[in-house]
């Protein structure tokens, strides 16, 4: 029996190695991020969006409005992610100069259902630095610039609790008074704000560190970037990244001596 197993041990590398060696080459050949990206205005009340999307965004937006946030606009990014229907709603608080994005994504295939949903509070500062606090379970594919601080609390579902965490973190970073760059820099132009602040700045940084390269009409991954983008989603690297994100959130809770309400869980999933 053991001899038979030994005779077929050579098959194991053939099963394991393709995702690590071949898949990055597929990404290198096919992945493209269109830029500037189309920002498609959406009407949550009249659109044909799946109920999985609207059933999440509309109730959350009402909670945020009760907290002093006002809606700027809802939109989709049809050119950014293939084979998905996405919708995001941007709200701002003019008193605290904070923004918040409520996002939901569904697959287009029959039965694909809801892929991800999350809320992200954002505070931008005059020196270009940024504090972002979200409850997304997804790990970002791109590297963050040193002046961008993203903290994940993926088991915090209540927006008031997530907002409390965000304001404490933004204050602790001591980066000055936040500014609403949507109005100060982009004069309320939502499409320009999304393209530059949410997408363009990040892509430029990926280019700077050698993970992406500019092409006509957008960006493509470099060979180095393709391998990093794929490997970070595979075992054991994805688990290590989740552990790092978890420890980062724990660090901030300890720094601020914050305790979550009893009905909130920060358990890792």
Image (cartoon, rainbow, N blue to C red):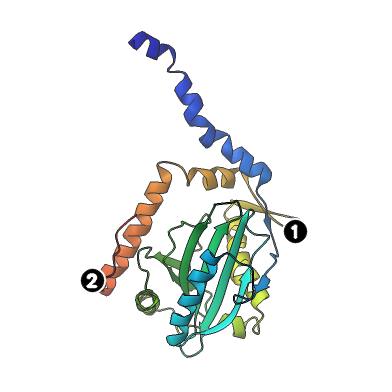
Res. 36 visible in picture = yes
| Element type at mark 1 | loop
Residue 254 circle label? none
For the N terminus, the image quarter is top left
Tell us which disc is closer to us: 2 or 1: 2
Q: Residue furthest right?
A: 216
Q: How many marks?
A: 2
User: Residue 186, image x and y in percent?
Assistant: 65, 81
- The vertical placement of 166 against 27, above or below, is below
Residue named by callout 2: 262
Residue named by callout 1: 217
Residue 107 appears left or right of 147: right
- The vertical placement of 68 against 61, above or below, is below
Residue at 46% from the left image edge and 66% from the top image edge:
118
User: Residue 137, image x and y in percent?
Assistant: 43, 59
Residue at 63% from the left image edge and 40% from the top image edge:
26
Res. 143 visible in picture = no
Residue 215 appears left or right of 227: right
Cα–Cα gap, marks 2 and 1: 49 Å
For the C terminus, the image quarter is bottom left
Neighbour tally class for label 1: few under 14, some 14-19, many 20 plus, Cα within 10 Å: few
Mark 2 and mark 1 lie on one chain; the one further toward the N terminus is 1
């Amino acid at each position: 029996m053991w001899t038979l197993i030994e005779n077929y041990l050579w098959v194991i590398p053939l099963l394991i190695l393709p995702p690590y060696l071949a898949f990055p080459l597929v990404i290198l050949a096919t992945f493209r991020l269109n830029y500037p990206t189309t920002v498609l205005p959406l009407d949550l009340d009249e659109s044909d969006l799946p109920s999985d999307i609207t059933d999440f965004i509309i109730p959350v937006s009402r909670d945020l409005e009760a907290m002093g946030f006002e809606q700027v606009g809802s939109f989709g990014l049809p050119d950014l992610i293939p084979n998905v229907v996405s919708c995001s709603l941007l709200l701002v608080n003019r008193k605290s100069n904070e923004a918040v994005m409520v996002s939901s994504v569904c697959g287009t295939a029959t039965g694909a259902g809801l892929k991800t949903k999350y809320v992200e509070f954002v505070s931008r500062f005059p020196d270009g630095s940024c504090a972002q606090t979200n409850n997304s379970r997804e790990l970002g594919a791109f590297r963050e610039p040193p002046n961008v601080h993203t903290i994940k609390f993926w088991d915090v579902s209540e927006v008031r609790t997530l907002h409390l965490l965000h304001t404490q973190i933004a204050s602790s970073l001591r980066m000055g008074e936040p500014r609403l760059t949507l109005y100060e820099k982009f004069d309320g132009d939502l499409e320009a704000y999304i393209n530059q602040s949410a997408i363009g700045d990040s892509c430029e940084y990926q280019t700077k560190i050698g993970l992406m390269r500019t092409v006509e009409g957008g960006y493509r991954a470099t060979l180095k970037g393709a391998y990093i983008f794929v490997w970070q989603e595979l075992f054991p690297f994805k688990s290590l990244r989740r552990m790092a994100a978890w420890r980062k959130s724990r660090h901030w809770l300890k720094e601020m001596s914050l305790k979550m309400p009893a009905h909130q869980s920060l358990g890792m999933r």
